[in-house]
Image: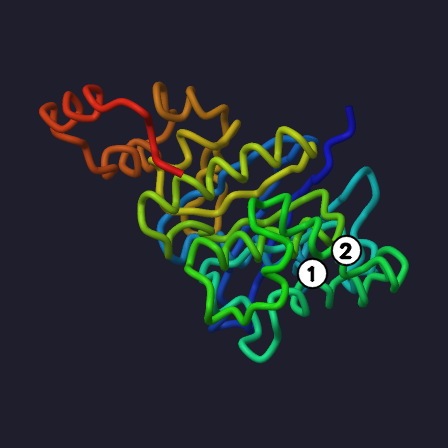
């Protein structure tokens, strides 16, 4: 089966010699339809540069990026921009404070020509309801929403654009633990129901273990290891991956017992 996304020998260099910065070096991987690939690594490892090349914010210096079996041009078409969407790290700053929630979501529908003009407010409300918010939230300003609600709006905006691949750039790092769990559960439900594919960029390996099918480990712009999630955690093949896993905070045994004794799971 043709992967939804393919990178082949992709590199990105900023500047020129002797001060050139090699942000991404000779990276190749695939993302299947409906798959969640986590991209992990310390700050400066090339994760965000990789995301920006997939999104078309800037072009790669060399190599090829393919989407749904076709090469992606450096200058993305409206169809490509609609199909590949971004959910940013900070949910509030990703929304224009001068626009209502509904206006921010509808903007994509207008730009990409999705649906009849007379139907677009209904499509906005449908997108909000898909992420668990009432349709009448479209009239609210972003400042009136909590962090978790803002992130749901950002996800709704991506869904309304009829996205097939969503780049999630640290989508829960700005949220508290309980809200984080709800957003992650929402993302997983949407992936299952809609067949979405995710590139999940994060430094939080505890999140990765629960959401990703595979993990791509980056260091200094290079892809050093890529494997299914259980294999990465149970049998990492390179020292750097072992160091990342070893740095994950360990919950004390008494706290684990306390968690196991609690019933009802994470409250909604």
**Which secondary structure lies at badge 2?**
helix
> Residue 123 versus residue 196: which sits nearer the camera?
123
Q: Which mark is residue 56?
A: 1
Image position of 203 with respect to 95: above or below: above
The quarter of the rendered structure image containing the N terminus is top right
Q: Position of residue 233 (x, y in %)?
A: 36, 25
Q: Quadrant of residue 232?
A: top left
For this view, does 53 lie left or right of residue 114?
left
Q: CA distance from mark 1 to mark 2?
A: 30 Å
Q: Is residue 90 left or right of residue 115?
A: left
Q: Quadrant of the C terminus?
A: top left
Q: Position of residue 244 (x, y in %)?
A: 30, 38
Whether residues under marks 1 and 2 lie with C-beta atoms below 8 angstroms apart, the answer is no
**Farthest residue in the bottom direction?**
98
Q: Position of residue 8 (x, y in %)?
A: 68, 42
Q: Is residue 230 left or right of residue 35?
A: left
How many C-alpha atoms fall within 10 Å of the one at disc 2: few (<14), some, or many (≥20)?
Answer: some
Pick the front one: 264 or 23: 264
Q: In this image, 45 relative to 155: left or right?
A: left
Relative depth, front residue between 85 and 26: 85
Residue located 62% across and 59% down the image: 136
Figure label count: 2
Q: Mark 1 or mark 2: name the one nearer the start of the chain.
A: 1
> Measuring 42% from the left and 20% from the top, which residue is drawn there?
231
Mark 2 — residue? Answer: 122
């Amino acid at each position: 089966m043709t992967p939804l996304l393919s990178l082949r020998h992709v590199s990105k260099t900023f500047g020129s010699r002797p001060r050139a910065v090699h942000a991404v070096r000779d990276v190749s991987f695939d993302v299947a339809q409906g798959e969640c690939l986590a991209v992990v690594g310390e700050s400066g490892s090339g994760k965000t540069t990789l995301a920006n090349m997939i999104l078309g914010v800037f072009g790669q210096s060399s190599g090829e990026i393919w989407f749904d079996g076709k090469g992606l041009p450096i200058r993305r078409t409206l169809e490509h921009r609609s199909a590949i969407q971004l959910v940013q790290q900070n949910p509030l700053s990703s929304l224009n404070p001068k626009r209502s929630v509904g206006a921010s979501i509808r903007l994509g529908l207008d730009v990409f020509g999705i649906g009849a003009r007379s139907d677009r407010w209904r499509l906005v409300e449908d997108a909000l309801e898909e992420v668990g918010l009432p349709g009448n939230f479209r009239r609210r300003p972003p400042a009136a929403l909590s962090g978790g609600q803002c992130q749901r709006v950002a996800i709704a905006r991506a869904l309304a654009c009829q996205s097939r691949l969503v780049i999630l750039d640290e989508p829960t790092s700005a949220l508290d633990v309980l809200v984080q769990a709800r957003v992650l559960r929402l993302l997983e439900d949407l992936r299952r129901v809609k067949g979405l594919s995710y590139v999940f960029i994060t430094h939080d390996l505890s999140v990765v273990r629960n959401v990703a099918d595979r993990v791509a480990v980056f260091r200094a712009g290079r892809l050093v290891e890529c494997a299914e999630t259980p294999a990465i955690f149970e049998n990492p093949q390179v020292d750097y991956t072992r160091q990342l896993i070893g740095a994950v905070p360990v919950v004390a045994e008494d706290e684990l017992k306390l968690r196991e004794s609690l019933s009802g799971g994470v409250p909604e």
